[in-house]
Amino acid sequence: MKIKSICCIGAGYVGGPTMSVIAQKNPQLKVTVVDINADRIAAWNCKDLAQLPIFEPGLDKVVGEARGQNLFFSTEVDKAIDEAEMIFISVNTPTKTYGAGKGMAADLQYVELCARQIAKVSKSDKIVVEKSTLPVKTAEAIKDILDNTGNGIHFEILSNPEFLAEGTAIQDLEAPDRVLIGGEPTETGQEAIEVLKNIYATWVPESQIITTNLWSSELSKLTANAFLAQRVSSINALTELCEKTGANITEVANAIGTDSRIGSKFLNASVGFGGSCFQKDILNLVYICKSLGLNQAADYWEQVVIMNNHQRTRFANQIVKALYGTVADKKIVFFGWAFKKNTNDTRESAAIYIADKLIEEHAQIQVYDPKVTALQMQSDLNYLNSRSEPENAKYLTTHSDPYDAVAGAHALAIITEWDEFKTYDWRKIYDNMSKPAFIFDGRNLLNRSALESIGFLYRGIGQ
Ligand SMILES: NC(=O)c1ccc[n+]([C@@H]2O[C@H](COP(=O)([O-])OP(=O)(O)OC[C@H]3O[C@@H](n4cnc5c(N)ncnc54)[C@H](O)[C@@H]3O)[C@@H](O)[C@H]2O)c1
């Protein structure tokens, strides 16, 4: 069975790019993406494709091709739900900041609101697809709400978690390793799976579309993120040992990564993972394990987050130690604020935590990032609530030119692996800085011996 119209609730980093690619690959399908955030929708509808609310390489081209043809962005949530045969829920599921499970469990209030709204508005049978990352068994709650508050129509629930990575979202959506669809083992459940499968099958080979039961699908997404984050923490856990023993983390990573059972991806030592997903999803997994009395499993996964926090703190401490034990009133420049290259997303970026620690020591932080706005950086720091907003503003300055940013700086920390950093005139950067000039490469991005030959006092993670 083929359908004609779908909608997606949530026009964020997942809903926007995912639906744009689905629309581009299925020109016969009407795709409407809705959000309660009117500014975000206005930005998605902006004529100038450089002003889209999300920066992702290639996204402008996809939106440019489909928008106004079969892809629409709107704030009319009820209308879109009413018209669609299939509704994706792609709203945020952050870590709870209050009540039971505070700091660990996923906050499902936005998902529940969506379910209630779908139930209230729908007048014909619908397939509801969980695109948001959700704790295992959430589909049960969604189904309860739909069946008990709806207008007596039939709802089928599918789980279709998204595996895209920010920074390569379009590439990942166009050539995914796999698409995962979970559904009920009933006849209608299997029919619903087929409907969604047909949408993906317009560009994804059928052998790469995996179908499972609902619970396996929900749990697989949490587990995939836990495994990826675990690799980052595992390699980072070795950086300190390298520093103490004279081993070199890049050489160790290369040596172990050539083993085909291990593989080379996600083995770069760094200031730690960031982004809206890894920490939140692992904490969620830990919470689920704890709620089921699985304390050993919970402790095992929690250690991945503990290690990540340690690495950020350690990086900040290294800077203070190298700058003769004090950074008070010293100018420390950050190259990069986004949590990774090729995105303007800063959620849970290591930069925020490292800046916070250094500001605690009264350092003056000066930041250059090619895509993140000054307003975003300030609001990231304010969100931590460590000090007042005016005080944060006093300690954090942003720059639009990297060479101006380093003028008179005592130290420079590379936080994000933006490609453009590798192309800079490092001699000029060195000349602009105060001497001795320190450089802390939090991603092992730059050529250590070239920097040292200019005169930098170089510190790379694990070297
Ligand atoms: N960002 C990623 O890389 C990524 C990857 C895979 C999965 N996920 C998961 O996808 C989900 C969405 O993540 P995101 O990064 O796109 O979040 P986001 O915060 O960028 O976007 C969510 C959007 O949903 C909107 N929203 C919330 N409640 C709404 C409602 N009731 N009606 C209409 N709109 C509403 C918000 O205004 C927001 O624009 C999360 O569960 C996340 O864990 C994210």
Image (tube, rainbow, N blue to C red):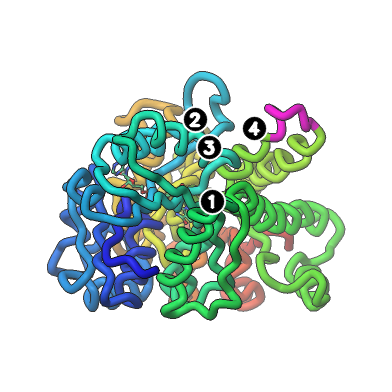
Q: Amino acid at mark 1?
A: Gly
Q: Nearer the viewer, residue 156 or 320?
A: 156
For this orientation, the residue located farthest to the top is 99
Q: Which residues are magenta?
A: 289-295
Between the residue at mark 4 and the residue at mark 3, the CA separation in whole angstroms equals 18 Å
The quadrant in which the C terminus is found is: bottom right
Q: Which mark is residue 287?
A: 4
Residue that numbered label 2 is attached to? 96
Q: Amino acid at mark 4?
A: Tyr
Closer to the N terminus: mark 3 or mark 1? 3
Closer to the N terminus: mark 4 or mark 3? 3
Residue that numbered label 1 is attached to? 274
Closer to the N terminus: mark 1 or mark 4? 1
Q: Residues within 10 Å of mark 2 (few under 14, many from 20)?
A: some
Q: Nearer the viewer, residue 27 or 400?
A: 27
Does the stretch in magenta take in 420? no
Q: In the image, what residue occupies the spot 75% across and 55% down?
A: 234
Between the residue at mark 3 and the residue at mark 1, the CA separation in whole angstroms equals 30 Å
Q: Nearer the viewer, residue 210 or 399?
A: 210
